[in-house]
Image (cartoon, rainbow, N blue to C red):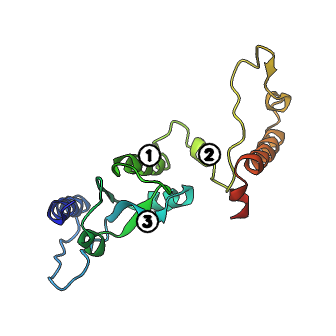
Amino acid sequence: MKPEPIFAAVEDLRGKIRKTSNTEHRTSNAQQSRIENRESKVILMSPTGRRFDQSFATELSRESHLIVICGHYEGVDHRVVEHLIDEEISIGDYVLTNGAIAAVVLVDAIVRLLPSVLGDQQSAIDDSFREGLLEAPQYTRPAEFRVWKVPEILLSGNHAQIAAWRKEQAKKRTRENRPDLLRE
């Protein structure tokens, strides 16, 4: 992708962010190698970027503004990377036809961590990867479906025992399905 439309779009967005934030407009001089703005972080979805994970999503959720750029087919002109991008991010070791799908993954993972986005904020706290473990198995009603029953401990009402059971199940599930998480 050519640099002109990307620079124009980011500069326009940053101008709007400045106005919204009631901050002083800062202009860049020609010698400056990177367009600066404290109110926004410019991200490029790229297979060469830092690997995206839950802790990175949490880190990015603390930013006041994110501008996400995604290339198409062969990516973007490298001058964009050199002079505009704050961080390149990869969602995995594979290549897609464009970065839009990767951008949606990034945005969804970040937005769900923001206050008031989820109906129950505890959901984000209990998610997989929050403590480096997969989430414990989920059970719903009815307590018995066909011949399969919800574990008795979950029906006990003893919150301390339920929490301990969930923690142990999360460890077990992680050992069985994602032992790589335990090595990190």
Disc 2, SS: loop
| Image quarter (top left, top right, bottom left or bottom right) of the C terminus | bottom right
Q: Quadrant of residue 136?
A: top right
Of callouts 3 and 2, the N-terminal one: 3
Residue occupying image coordinates x 43% and y 65%: 49
Of callouts 1 and 3, the N-terminal one: 3
Q: Quadrant of residue 12?
A: bottom left
Which numbered tag is attached to residue 127? 2
Label 3 sits on what residue type?
Answer: Gly
Residue occupying image coordinates x 17% and y 71%: 25
Q: Is residue 156 left or right of residue 121?
A: right
For disc 1, the marked residue is 108
For disc 3, the marked residue is 49
Image position of 28 with respect to 142: above or below? below
Label 2 sits on what residue type?
Answer: Asp
Label 1 and label 2: CA atoms lie apart by: 14 Å
Label 3 and label 2: CA atoms lie apart by: 25 Å
- Where residue 75 sits: x, y (%)? 30, 59
Of callouts 1 and 2, the N-terminal one: 1
Q: Quadrant of residue 154?
A: top right
